[in-house]
């Protein structure tokens, strides 16, 4: 990277290894005044006499304005669509309330030391926190009356968590989590001398890694016996992968982005514009000179998708509202999708092309406060904590279907009863990851089961009992984009088959995964280069694609039994574009704690916690930190805005505190401002929080 500076040492230009140059302008007091991007687009910032940011104009000409009160506290934000977000402060300049664009207010209660001890959300639901003498949260009670209690050691680490039974955690002298157990699931970990994670065993199923001297993952072995072996070049970039008997080769650009993936079935090629956005992706079968499929993208100056030209499915054009949200999609001049929003970003009406069975959630939507109570022919009921507990679907025949949902104190979905009377139960490991789901018939007999193995915060392997199959997923290093999948049949000891994995079984079925601009799988290619599965979701992820590939938006897994997407910390409903529970981080990530990201063509939420830029190759694990329950959360929404962190520019105007967040279990996550070092207060360090996160 080449950087030029002015006489005061401020960055004037920054040129990346591909030759793309970004130019920066500054005020006389050292505040950013402008940024000109490599594609020629620019954005500007305006400041008042006290160096408060008063306006930001983005590359599409949309202006956001900010107002301040006494002592320069931020009091209001006016968005390009005219909506207003307001902030109230107490006499000590501590945030006391936030009023959203619909006029609904979220309030904070503090003790004499200024610490938050309770918050009342937009709908009047109150969550309270109990602190110990050191100011640490040791109990949290939600509006349903469910309480999570914590036992902490002298270093502030969780040693026990009490909620619907007790979970215990064991630490070694170096501060590594070595064992943990809920009433249902146990976990064990082993490390090398440098603290690198070598193995993780959950209920007897072990995932193992081989590391080099620098702590980089060279190989991974799943519980099912599938090996992923990486080849690194001299700079440490991953240029090759041997996966269950199949070889993949990666051609990278100077920024480490994958330009070509070559495998037995052919190649997947990608192109990027000077701003780092994906402009095209093609697939070419082995032995062919011309691509068999091509997808091209066109963008607004601010990066929102405006055009998607698919060689098989035609061209789609996107129309945006003043806030940059998708309002209309047309194909061949015909409107195929249409959405309307209220000032807070809630979808108020939706329509998209679908079969008769998939039209239930289309039409007008009705809210009670911030809770969605009706979407088309679907009606929703919630408990006192705002969690979805019942969905009733009115059929065109006049009948009714009903799903019922049960949640524990940690906001984890534990049971679903389907309209047919079948029951699905869900189990989670001590780090909050879903490790099993079981299907029971109306008489209680087990019909089928799934077991899941996690590689940090991404799904590594799935074992399905009926039919007996195992599916292994390999991911981009430090990313949330899948690149390959293998499926094989598992032996049946009850049929006289030996319960061992031969290489032939492991090699049974291979597919390269083709993803879209944000990392959503859109097709699978076999070893002959043929498409074996395809996915054409609508703007908010609703799709009729089958379970041959259950992954959807980054971080999401489609549950066929409910239609919901498991998103690690929450469940997402693609029919509504909303989560079924409130954000466990409260208002920290967004003033709308139930909605998905504002525009799913440019943003993702791979952890079900906070939206972030999809960036170039999807979010990288280095942009996330460990949370208190062992998964990872974004270091900061601002940190994922490309160019700002590296150039030292501020990317959010708010002066509001809020660097410390309370999770449902009462533990804390700390996120620092862009000007400081992003740190966390993890009570359980996840593998992804290591300096060199494993991701194979």
Image: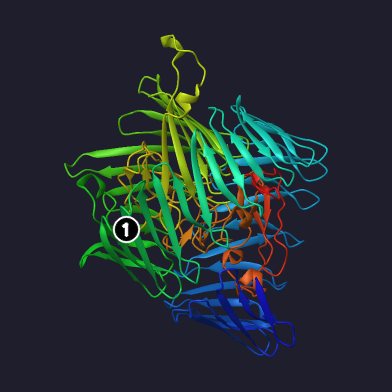
Examine the rendered structure and indicate whether residue 329 appears above or below residue 464. below
Image quadrant holding the C terminus, namely top right
Percent position of residue 598, x then y = 44, 64
Q: Residue at x 45, y 57 (%)?
A: 518
Q: Mark 1 points at which residue?
A: 365
Q: Nearer the viewer, residue 322 or 208?
A: 208
Q: Residues within 10 Å of mark 1 (few under 14, many from 20)?
A: many
Answer yes or no: is residue 344 visible.
yes
Q: Residue at x 74, y 44 (%)?
A: 213
Examine the rendered structure and indicate whether residue 206 appears above or below residue 532. above
Q: Which of 493 and 158 is in front in this view?
A: 493
Answer yes or no: is residue 552 visible.
no
The reply, left or right, for residue 477 in relation to residue 668 is: left
Rendered image quadrant of residue 219: top right
The reply, left or right, for residue 388 in relation to residue 634 is: left
Percent position of residue 156, x then y = 78, 46
Image quadrant holding the N terminus, namely bottom right
Examine the rendered structure and indicate whether residue 71 appears above or below residue 130. below
Percent position of residue 599, x then y = 42, 63
């Amino acid at each position: 990277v080449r950087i030029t500076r002015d006489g005061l040492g401020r960055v004037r230009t920054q040129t990346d290894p591909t030759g793309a140059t970004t130019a920066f302008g500054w005020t006389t007091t050292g505040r950013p005044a402008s940024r000109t991007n490599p594609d020629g687009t620019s954005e500007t910032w305006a400041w008042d006499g006290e160096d408060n940011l008063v306006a930001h104009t983005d590359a599409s000409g949309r202006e956001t304005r900010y107002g301040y009160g006494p002592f320069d506290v931020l009091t209001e934000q006016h968005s390009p669509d005219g909506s207003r977000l307001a902030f109230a402060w107490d006499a000590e300049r501590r945030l006391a309330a936030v009023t959203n664009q619909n006029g609904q207010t979220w309030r904070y209660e503090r003790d004499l030391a200024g610490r938050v001890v309770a918050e009342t959300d937009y709908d009047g639901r109150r969550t309270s926190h109990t602190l110990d003498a050191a100011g640490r949260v040791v109990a949290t009670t939600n509006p349903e009356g469910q309480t999570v209690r914590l036992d902490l050691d002298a270093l502030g680490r969780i040693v026990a968590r009490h909620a619907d039974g007790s979970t215990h955690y064991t630490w070694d002298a170096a501060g590594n989590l070595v064992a943990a157990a809920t009433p249902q699931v146990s976990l064990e970990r082993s490390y090398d001398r440098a603290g690198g994670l070598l193995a993780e065993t959950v209920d007897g199923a072990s995932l193992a890694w081989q590391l080099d001297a620098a702590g980089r993952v060279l190989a991974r072995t799943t519980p099912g016996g599938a090996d992923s072996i990486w080849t690194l070049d001299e700079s440490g970039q991953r240029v090759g992968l041997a996966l269950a008997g199949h070889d993949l080769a990666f051609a990278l650009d100077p920024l480490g982005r994958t330009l070509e993936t070559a495998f037995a079935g052919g190649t997947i090629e990608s192109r990027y514009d000077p701003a780092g956005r994906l402009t095209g992706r093609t697939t070419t079968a082995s032995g062919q000179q011309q691509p068999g499929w091509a997808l091209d993208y066109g963008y607004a100056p601010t990066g929102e998708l405006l055009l998607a030209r698919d060689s098989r499915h035609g061209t789609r054009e996107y129309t945006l509202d003043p806030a940059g949200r998708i309002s209309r999609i047309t194909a061949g001049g015909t409107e195929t999708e249409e959405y309307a929003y209220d000032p807070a970003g809630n979808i108020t009406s939706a329509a998209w092309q679908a079969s008769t069975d998939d039209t239930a959630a289309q039409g007008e939507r009705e809210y009670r406060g911030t809770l969605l109570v009706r979407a088309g022919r679907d009606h929703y009921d919630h408990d006192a904590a705002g969690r979805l507990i019942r969905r009733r679907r009115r059929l065109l025949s006049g009948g009714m279907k009903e799903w019922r949902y049960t949640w524990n104190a940690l906001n984890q979905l534990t049971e679903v009863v389907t309209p047919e009377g079948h029951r699905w139960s869900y189990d989670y490991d001590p780090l909050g990851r879903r490790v099993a789901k079981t299907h029971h018939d109306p008489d209680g007999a087990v019909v089928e089961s799934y077991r899941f193995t996690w590689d940090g915060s991404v799904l590594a392997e799935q074992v399905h009992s009926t039919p007996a199959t195992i599916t292994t997923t390999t991911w981009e290093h430090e990313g949330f984009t899948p690149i390959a999948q293998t499926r094989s049949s598992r032996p049946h000891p009850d049929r006289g088959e030996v319960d061992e994995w031969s290489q032939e079984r492991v090699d049974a079925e291979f597919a390269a995964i083709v993803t879209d601009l944000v990392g959503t799988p859109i097709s699978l290619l076999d070893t002959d280069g043929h498409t074996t599965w395809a996915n054409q979701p609508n703007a908010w992820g609703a799709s009729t694609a089958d379970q041959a590939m259950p992954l959807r938006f980054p971080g999401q897994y489609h549950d066929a039994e409910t239609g919901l997407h498991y998103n690690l910390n929450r469940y997402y409903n693609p029919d509504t574009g909303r989560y079924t529970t409130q954000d466990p981080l409260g208002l920290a990530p967004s003033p709308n704690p139930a909605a998905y990201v504002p525009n799913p063509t440019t943003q993702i939420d791979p952890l079900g916690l906070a939206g972030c830029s999809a960036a170039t190759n999807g979010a990288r694990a280095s942009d996330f930190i460990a949370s208190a329950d062992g998964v990872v959360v974004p270091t900061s929404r601002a940190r994922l805005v490309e160019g700002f962190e590296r150039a030292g520019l501020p990317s959010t105007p708010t002066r509001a505190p809020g660097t410390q967040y309370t999770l449902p279990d009462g533990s804390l996550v700390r996120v620092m401002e862009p000007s400081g070092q992003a740190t966390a207060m993890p009570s359980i360090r996840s593998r992804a929080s290591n300096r060199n996160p494993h991701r194979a």
